[in-house]
Image: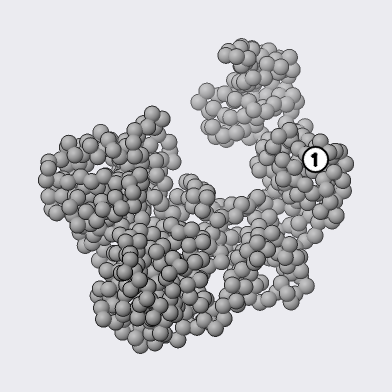
């Protein structure tokens, strides 16, 4: 019945159905689940409890007839004074000239709008004649498209509820409703559309928050299970003693977090299912060391390993560090776009004949001519820099190789398990001992010369510096420093002994490589750059990071940039040059100077920016929830994930009649069908 067209509802004709279709409402079910996006609460509070700039409702007596004035083209301003609690409050209404005839002296009115505590003034967005008791205290506000209005929607939703509410089926088993004290589906729908009080609305929202998270997590867990079970017979019988011997040969001791993550990965390698794991770790936390140990394990199981990275310079750095770690224990080759002709053929033949144990490379690894003899372990570093298809091709290079994705972008665990719900997540949230913390300072542009003198002093100690800028060339629209101008300024400021380099996204790949190689060799002492250096460049000699117009960046991006320094035992510095106008910008700078922990920063960034901005809208893969909010409702997200895991692992969907509603929903889900095809 709920799948019937909206035209079956009383009062919905073909024309109104067309208007509803613009909001993706085609069926009765679509309409019932088209929830308000906010609620206007008409609650009278004492004047001394009203908060400046908040939306408030006041009730009072109009002292004199309103005064109307016009300005601009057809714009109007209506002002009058109301008395409430013996205080005269000024009311201002814009572009409501018609209200002059409706509001008269001595009328009692209820006004809702923005409160200015300093002027004792309310800018009215909503008004009604009469006292507040005569109105509903909570008014739902729907997302509107085309010719839809709140009044029309409320009317048609009311008709749909009267006619169809009893056809709504419960999908969450009774035990969960009782455990979490949440209402059943029917009562929750009713409270979402027509809440009698805040408490009922709060519980209805809690119910749909949990339901949305549970359904999403069930999909993720189910996909994981199906993927795992399709790759049985994949256990890697590695030699624990050789692996332990390799660990002991390293010139450092693993941190607790490294050991914990390593054990999780090695357990996956032993299991008969293919590993699909994300390894998160802050810049410098030691992800590469963990990856190297896993590569050693796969070699001892007579398999090959592959490490794919986004840039040639990063591939060369990883190749060099793996050669240093393994010595004679393994045959390691480098495969990038620069390896061509005869040399490339020799390398690909060696890989095919299993004369090579580990291949380090860029996307050159996934070309057709690269055929592995027995790929057992594939690592994708800075995984977000590769497309889904590129990662899939690497996976297909072996018979279900174990795959480890690595990222230095700290993502709060709550979000990681949602965004990467079909992966297992390991986290290295501990830094190696002895590493000096980067000192971070926030200053304004008028101190820039002092900053440049500081850089010159560090260069005199044979150290290097980055200076980061948001723009490449001058922009009329944005009054911010630009890279090319800054490069010329610094060339003029420094003597010929300090070499200044320029790096930005418009340079060709070859030009970028050349600049970075010169910087890595200390032929360039100060590198002026856009954010292209954000990921994966390792220049241990660089100790100063200056970020111009720092307020234009999010916390996570600032942290990534800061992570380009502090890569040796020398003291490193990050200087933020910023003059933020808003409170959020100031808060961001303050947080940056107070913590160097990437996970703490990412939590703060989420609160300030929201998940869409945090991940980037295009590649986030985050689901769109109608009611749930992953930041504010993170506890519900964790609860739903644990419940989903239990339901899937215990096969409750198939074996317990109480879960039939959930099973049916998942079977009809278009996302699941698309993923499984």
Q: Position of residue 3 (x, y in %)?
A: 81, 53
Q: Quadrant of residue 433?
A: bottom left
Residue closer to the observer: 546 or 306:
306
Residue sitting nearer the eye, 288 or 80:
288
Residue under the point 19% across and 49% down? 525
Mark 1 Cα within 10 Å, few/some/many (few <14, many 20+)? some
| The N terminus sits in image quarter | bottom right
What number of labels is visible?
1
Image quadrant holding the C terminus, namely bottom right
Location of residue 563 in the rendering, given as x and y in whole percent from the top left corner? 32, 56
User: Which residue matches tag 1?
Assistant: 17
Residue 327 shown left or right of residue 55 in the figure: left
Residue 241, visible in the rendered structure: yes
Residue at figure coordinates x 32%, y 61% from the top left: 338
Left or right: 11 in relation to 280: right
- The spot of residue 340 in percent (x, y) is 33, 64
Residue at x-position 49% and y-position 78%? 268
């Amino acid at each position: 019945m709920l799948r019937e067209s909206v035209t079956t509802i009383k009062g919905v004709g073909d024309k109104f159905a067309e208007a509803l279709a613009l909001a993706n409402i085609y069926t009765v079910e679509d309409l019932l689940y088209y929830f308000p996006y906010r609620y206007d609460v008409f609650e009278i509070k004492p004047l001394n409890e009203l908060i400046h700039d908040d939306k408030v409702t006041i009730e009072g007596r109009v002292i004199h007839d309103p005064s109307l004035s016009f300005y601009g083209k057809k714009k109007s301003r209506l002002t009058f004074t109301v008395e409430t609690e013996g205080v005269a409050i000024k009311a201002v209404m814009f572009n409501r000239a018609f209200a002059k005839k409706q509001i008269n002296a001595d009328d009692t009115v209820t006004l809702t709008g923005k409160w200015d505590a300093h002027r004792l003034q309310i800018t009215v967005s909503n008004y009604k004649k009469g006292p507040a008791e005569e109105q509903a205290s909570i008014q739902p506000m729907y997302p509107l498209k085309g010719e839809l209005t709140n009044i029309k929607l409320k009317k048609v939703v009311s008709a749909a509820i009267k006619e169809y509410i009893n056809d709504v089926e419960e999908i969450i088993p009774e035990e969960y409703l009782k455990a979490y004290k949440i209402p059943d589906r029917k009562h929750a729908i009713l409270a979402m559309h027509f809440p009698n009080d805040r408490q009922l609305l709060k519980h209805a929202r809690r119910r749909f928050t949990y339901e949305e998270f549970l359904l999403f997590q069930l999909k993720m867990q189910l996909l994981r299970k199906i993927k795992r079970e399709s790759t049985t017979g994949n256990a890697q019988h590695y030699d624990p003693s050789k692996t332990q011997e390799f660990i002991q040969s390293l010139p450092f001791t693993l941190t607790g977090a490294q050991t914990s993550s390593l054990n999780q990965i090695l357990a996956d390698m032993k299991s008969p299912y293919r590993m699909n794991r994300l390894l998160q770790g802050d810049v410098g936390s030691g992800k590469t060391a963990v990856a190297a140990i896993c590569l050693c394990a796969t070699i001892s199981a007579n398999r090959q390993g592959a490490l794919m990275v986004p840039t040639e310079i990063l591939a060369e750095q990883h190749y060099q560090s793996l050669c240093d770690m393994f010595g004679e224990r393994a045959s390691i080759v480098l495969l990038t776009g620069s390896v061509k002709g005869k040399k490339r053929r020799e390398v690909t033949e060696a890989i095919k004949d299993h004369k090579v144990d580990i291949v380090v490379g860029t996307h050159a690894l996934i070309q057709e001519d690269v055929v592995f003899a027995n790929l057992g372990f594939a690592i994708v570093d800075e995984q977000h820099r590769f497309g889904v298809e590129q990662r899939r091709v690497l996976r297909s290079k072996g018979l279900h190789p174990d795959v480890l994705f690595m990222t230095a972008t700290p993502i709060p665990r709550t979000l990681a398990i949602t965004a990467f719900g079909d992966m297992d997540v390991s986290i290295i949230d501990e830094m190696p001992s002895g590493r000096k913390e980067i000192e971070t300072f926030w200053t304004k542009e008028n101190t820039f010369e002092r900053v440049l003198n500081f850089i010159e002093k560090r260069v005199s100690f044979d150290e290097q510096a980055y200076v980061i800028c948001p723009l490449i060339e001058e922009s009329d629209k944005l009054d911010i420093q630009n890279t090319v101008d800054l490069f010329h300024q610094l060339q003029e400021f420094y003597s010929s002994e300090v070499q200044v380099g320029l790096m930005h996204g418009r340079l060709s790949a070859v030009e970028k490589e050349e600049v970075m190689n010169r910087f890595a060799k200390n032929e360039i002492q100060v590198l002026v750059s856009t954010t292209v250096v954000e990921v994966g460049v390792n220049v241990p000699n660089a100790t100063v990071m200056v970020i111009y117009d720092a307020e234009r960046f999010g916390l996570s991006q600032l942290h990534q940039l800061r992570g380009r320094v502090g890569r040796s035992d020398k003291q490193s510095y990050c200087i933020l040059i910023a003059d933020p106008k808003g409170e959020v910008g100031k808060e961001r700078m303050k947080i940056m100077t107070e913590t160097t922990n990437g996970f703490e920063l990412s939590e703060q960034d989420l609160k300030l920016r929201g998940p869409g901005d945090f991940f980037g809208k295009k590649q986030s893969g985050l689901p769109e929830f109608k009611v749930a909010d992953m930041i504010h409702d993170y506890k519900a997200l964790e609860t739903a994930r644990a419940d989903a895991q239990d339901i899937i692992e215990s096969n409750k969907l198939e074996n317990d009649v109480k879960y039939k509603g959930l099973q049916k929903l998942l079977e009809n889900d278009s996302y699941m069908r698309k993923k499984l095809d």
